[in-house]
Image: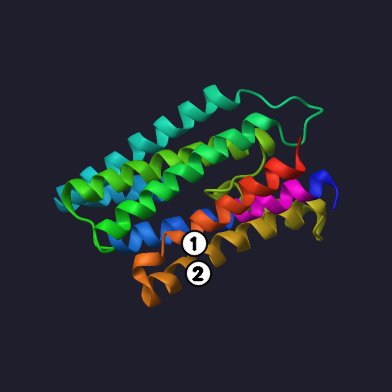
Amino acid sequence: MDDARRRDVLLVALTFAAGAVDAVVFLRLDVFTAVMTGNIVLLGLAVGQGAFRNAFRSLVALTAYAAGVLAAARLVGTTPHDSIWPAHVTRALAIEWVLHAVFLGGWILTDARPDGVAAASLIAVSGVAMGIQAATARTLAPNMSTTYVTGTLTALLSELSALGALGPDARRRVTIVVALGVGAVCGALVLVSAAALAPALPVLVIGAVVLVAATRFR
């Protein structure tokens, strides 16, 4: 497998992890920590309905995500045109992995039902992690996203309408969209069958991404 293909596979894996994260966090904590478009809508709904606890959680998620993006932007910077996967990308994703591991630990300590300060803390940890992932992935593939797919889906449908067939970029976009949905399904299934271990899914996937990146991109 060449480096470009390996990079695309790892981006798909990150997208799968993001879908799993959002499924688990939304179903138990009533917010999104990866898809900020949906989270902004949830914030508006919470304010409109007077559900101020949910509004606070959405604000925490938005603030944490922004902090993660800013931190990753400083850490990663810009990717040289001749580099498929720079070392600083792997370091940023390693930090994301640590944050997901912290989330898993906190989740287990609260018996998979965090509330109050514990819930807000876990939302913040997850939001920073997903902000780091979003900013890091953007340096690798500016036209793709591993945390939200509205733009990817729009570009895919526009290209399909114009060309009537799927080119290489369109096939990548299809894979990204499908990966997010499949990740959400898997996250929800693990939450139902083994709630305490649900956050372990993104920990395992992102850990594998970091391991492959560290050994295959030098």
Q: Is residue 190 left or right of residue 140?
A: left
Whether residue 155 is visible here, answered yes or no, is no
Q: Which residue is mark 2?
A: 186
Q: Secondary structure at mark 1?
A: helix
Which residue is at a point 63% across and 50% down the rendered structure image?
209
Principal SS element in the magenta part? helix
Q: Position of residue 30 (x, y in %)?
A: 29, 57
Q: Is residue 191 left or right of residue 114?
A: right
Q: Mark on residue 153?
A: none
Whole-number angstrom distance, CA of label 2 to CA of label 1: 8 Å
- Residue type at mark 1: give it: Leu
Q: Quadrant of residue 177?
A: bottom right
Q: Position of residue 86 (x, y in %)?
A: 71, 31
Q: Mark on residue 201?
A: 1
**Residue toward you, 89 or 135:** 89
Residue 130 shown in magenta: no
Q: Quadrant of residue 64?
A: top left
Residue 7 shown in magenta: yes
Q: Position of residue 110 (x, y in %)?
A: 24, 58
Crowd rating for badge 2 (residues with CA inside 10 Å; few <14, some 14–19, many 20+): many
Q: Position of residue 81 (x, y in %)?
A: 78, 27
Q: Are marks 2 and 1 in contact (CB under 8 Å)?
A: yes
Which residue is at a point 65% across and 48% down the rendered structure image?
211
Instruction: Tell me the colour scheme of the image.
Output: rainbow
Q: How many marks?
A: 2
- Which contiguous range is marked in magenta? 6-14
In the image, residue 11 above or below residue 135: below
Whether residue 105 is visible here, answered yes or no, is yes
**Residue toward you, 83 or 163:** 83
Q: Quadrant of the C terminus?
A: top right
- Residue type at mark 2: give it: Cys
